[in-house]
Image (cartoon, helix red, strand yellow):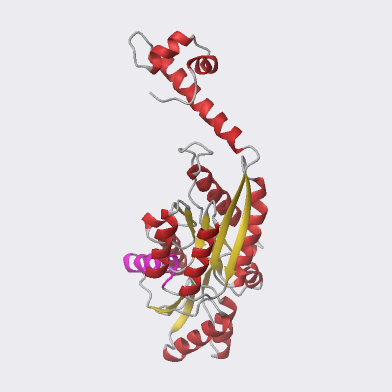
Amino acid sequence: MTRRFGIKEIAFQAGLSPATVDRALHGRDHVRSLTRERVAAALAELESQHAASLAQGRRFTIDIFIQSPDRFSTAVRAAFEAELPLVRPVAFRARFHLAEVMEEREIVARLTAIARRGSHGIVLKVPATPAIEACLAAIKARGIPVVTYVTDIATPLRLAYVGMENRRAGATAAYLLQRMQRQEGARVLVTLSSQMFRGEDERRIGFLDHLARHGPVLPTLTVSEGLGVDRTTRQLVLEALRRHPDIGSVYSIGGGNRAILDAFAEAGRGIDVFVAHDLDRTNRQLLAEGKLTLVLHHDFRQDARQVSLHFLRFHRLVPPDAAVNPTDILIACPTDL
């Protein structure tokens, strides 16, 4: 058996004699189960202390790579900058790579540059295209862990996913909207920034699946590829309103909510129920103004803690069984602000 610690060191930690520890480690007879448990616990304590001593004074540099509207990425950056200095036992430093819109080849080029320069981990929110996933396969081969954030990629290519469970979030939105909508038979407009973001499409699927399985069934229309940018989102919504006079409520998955409201106002239409995602600066203001019915959100600082724990586990600086709690789905109403 290969061990990091000597018999005497383990015996001292366990409060047992070296001979007893030797018998326990080698599986010999006449060792009580309680004694074996004490030896195992001593080994675990020594491993934890060793990891902490190795980490003391170490610095980790991680890269946070997000394609999203500025209102979202700004809130995420603020959360990570607030939370990472509190993480122990290593000091985390973040390099941010944020953009509202990026072409696929630019994403691949930037990720390749990050991998070439080196990183202790990448936090990623980008579309799940074949070229990007091929790039991530090469990054994994370099031994750089990737944690996807809010939207996912193929499971083998990433270490972990952090963010609310998207199908459950969509089902939650459907449940609430079904019970709040007052216009019988009114169509629900579902807006995505892009179906290439797997997390957004998972929310849409969860929403539609819940509507199909639980009455009352509401007709829906999905519009996408506005990328959460106000100008393109507004045009897509205006066109949907021209073609469908029965649209009465909105489930906004991809953002651009001020643009959605502007489109309804230009068309002279009201919104019965407006469900959105994320408590960013814009949504807080719209919620306070009573223009959003409710916002599904999650704690970005909790996300930052989860991300750091995944990286610490990968680098063996915390026990491999250290728990990472699932992200809570929170609901904000105008009265919460």
Left or right: where does residue 216 sit relative to residue 17?
left
Q: Is residue 212 magenta?
A: yes
Which residues, given as a range, are shown in magenta? 196-213
Vertical position of residue 55 compared to residue 96: above or below: above
Q: Position of residue 190 (x, y in %)?
A: 44, 75
Q: Is residue 242 above or below residue 46?
A: below
Where does residue 7 sit, x and y in percent of width and height?
A: 48, 16
At x 56%, y 65%, the residue is: 278
- Specify whether residue 291 is painted magenta: no
Q: Main secondary structure of the magenta part?
A: helix
Rendered-image quadrant of the N terminus:
top left
Q: Nearer the viewer, residue 302 or 172?
A: 302
Q: In the rendered image, is residue 129 in sight?
A: no
Residue visible at 53% across and 49% down in the picture: 306
Q: Does 187 sit above or below residue 89?
A: below
Rendering coords of residue 333 (x, y %):
59, 64
